[in-house]
Image: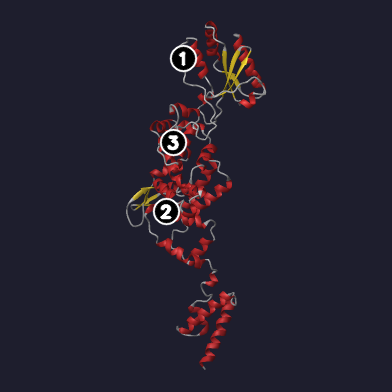
């Protein structure tokens, strides 16, 4: 065994004993390079891959020098052997083939110096991403583009694919064609090697106002089909666009349009509400029925809430956020009918009802629908905030006539108004109170007529 190789092996063992993964990169090839270097009088050098930073290595090797070369943690000269430490890629979302270094830039350089043939190995050393934008070219080009050969670069960390979609949405930039093709071709690998936690972590960094674009890009890249197939399948579910036309649209396009219209005004920074809008019609996939030329989706809100609960569990969404989203999905149609006073009072008792109102308004805008029900409900909503006893008398006109013996006329209206005022003031609190109040008032009116 070559002495230089033995030296590198002993250093790798030191790292392993100190709790850092380390190995001599491509031992067979480096042994051949060392032999060729010796024949050509070149200083022996060996490359080691390790999961240790410069600060980790310095206490172990006091003569370690830093380096600005890409992927190099540090350089050490030990017993006349140059040891170069390369950062071992530890990204969980990398292609397994790229978690192991087969060749380094230093090895390629020494092969050329020793006159060895270029083996053309493509699996090289990949530095760990330390920068939010590392792996991407400058956006001043007007595109979101992955550095180098995108298809090779993305294999080093498939999160680069998701990140590219996020940048394209947040910064309203197109994705460079070769980068887009790399994302398309790696969609299945991205799903295989990216955890739900990483997926949601990227999604949380999307601005609410741009989330519709991110969702559309996930769909176009066929990533959504694998991570949330229940929503992507809505692209094959048709519905009537609005009540005033026979035009149809698919439910996924409608969902994207709702996501575009929801984050406005006081809701423009509402990430959770926009995320709920993304799921609000998922129940239509399971409740769709076609009868006499019309699509119906009865109970899609209730069914959808159950489906969304299982999806969010799969995505490891915290329980409190999951409960809030499912609640919005379950009640998202609660404001879409022309509600009576009683209906509006029930609506006011629903938690988070302002978000639900905003969801319905987004639904109207996305379908060019009618504001009739919405405007009616808004008009009478404040009135419904009052207790029921302050809006209607406890006895209606017919009941007042039965107790008073009066015929329909001015007296009945006066008694009714007086009863309502008594209820508001707190003088009358129950039906027996109301009866006593009416009888006393009738007696007073009859005495005045004498």
Q: Is tag 3's residue or tag 2's residue first in the polypeptide sequence?
A: 3
Q: Secondary structure at mark 3?
A: helix
View extreme (left): residue = 246
Is residue 103 in view? no
Task: Give the CA separation, mark 3 to mark 2.
Answer: 34 Å
Residue 21 screen position, x and y as percent: 61, 23
Q: Secondary structure at mark 1?
A: loop
Task: Identify the image quadrant of residue 128.
Answer: top right
Task: Look at discs 1 and 3 and give the one toward the viewer.
Answer: 3
Q: Which residue is mark 3?
A: 139
Residue 92 screen position, x and y as percent: 55, 30
Q: Which residue is mark 2?
A: 363
View extreme (bottom): residue = 450
Residue 263 screen position, x and y as percent: 46, 51
Q: Residues within 10 Å of mark 3 (few under 14, many from 20)?
A: some
Q: Secondary structure at mark 2?
A: helix
Q: Nearer the viewer, residue 54 or 438?
A: 54
Q: Which residue is mark 1?
A: 119
Q: Nearer the viewer, residue 272 or 243?
A: 272
Task: Give the CA separation, mark 1 to mark 3.
Answer: 35 Å
Which quadrant, please, contains the N terminus?
top right
Q: Against 78, is 195 above or below?
A: below
Task: Look at discs 2 and 1 and give the one toward the viewer.
Answer: 1
């Amino acid at each position: 065994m070559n002495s230089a190789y033995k030296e590198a092996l002993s250093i790798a063992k030191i790292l392993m004993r100190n709790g850092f993964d380390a190995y001599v990169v491509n031992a067979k090839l480096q042994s051949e390079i060392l032999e060729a270097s010796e024949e050509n009088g070149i200083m022996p050098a060996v490359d080691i891959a390790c999961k240790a930073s410069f600060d980790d290595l310095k206490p172990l090797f006091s003569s370690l020098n830093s380096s600005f070369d890409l992927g190099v943690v540090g350089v050490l000269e030990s017993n006349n052997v140059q040891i170069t430490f390369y950062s071992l890629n530890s990204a969980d979302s990398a292609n397994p083939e790229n978690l192991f270094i087969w060749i380094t830039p230093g090895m390629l350089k020494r092969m050329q110096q020793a006159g060895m043939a270029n083996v053309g190995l493509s699996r090289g050393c990949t530095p760990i991403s330390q920068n939010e934008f590392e792996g991407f070219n400058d956006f001043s080009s007007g595109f979101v583009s992955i550095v180098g050969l995108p298809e090779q670069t993305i294999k080093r960390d498939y999160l680069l694919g998701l990140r590219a979609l996020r940048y394209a949405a947040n910064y309203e930039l197109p994705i460079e064609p070769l980068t887009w093709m790399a994302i398309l071709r790696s969609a299945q690998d991205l799903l295989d090697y990216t955890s739900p936690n990483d997926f949601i972590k990227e999604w949380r960094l999307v601005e609410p106002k741009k989330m519709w674009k991110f969702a559309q890009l996930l769909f176009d890249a066929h990533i959504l089909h694998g991570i949330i197939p229940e929503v992507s399948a809505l692209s094959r579910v048709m519905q009537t666009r609005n009540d005033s036309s026979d035009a149809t649209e698919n439910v996924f396009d409608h969902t994207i349009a709702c996501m575009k219209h929801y984050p406005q005004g006081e809701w423009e920074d509402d990430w959770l509400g926009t995320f709920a809008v993304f799921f609000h019609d998922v129940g239509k996939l399971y409740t769709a029925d076609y009868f006499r030329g019309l699509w119906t989706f009865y109970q899609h809100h209730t069914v959808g809430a159950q489906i969304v609960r299982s999806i969010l569990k799969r995505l490891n969404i915290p329980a409190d956020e999951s409960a809030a989203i499912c609640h919005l999905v379950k009640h998202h149609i609660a404001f879409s009918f022309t509600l009576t006073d009683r209906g509006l009072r029930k609506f006011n008792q629903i938690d988070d009802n302002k978000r639900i109102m905003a969801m319905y308004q987004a639904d109207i805008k996305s379908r060019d629908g009618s504001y009739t029900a919405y405007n009616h409900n808004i008009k009478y909503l404040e009135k419904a905030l009052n207790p029921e006893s302050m809006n209607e008398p406890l006895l209606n006109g017919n009941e007042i006539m039965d107790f008073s013996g009066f015929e329909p006329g001015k007296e009945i209206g006066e008694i009714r108004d007086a009863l309502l005022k008594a209820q508001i003031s707190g003088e009358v609190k129950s039906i027996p109170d109301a009866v006593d109040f009416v009888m006393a008032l009738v007696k007073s009116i009859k005495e005045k007529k004498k």
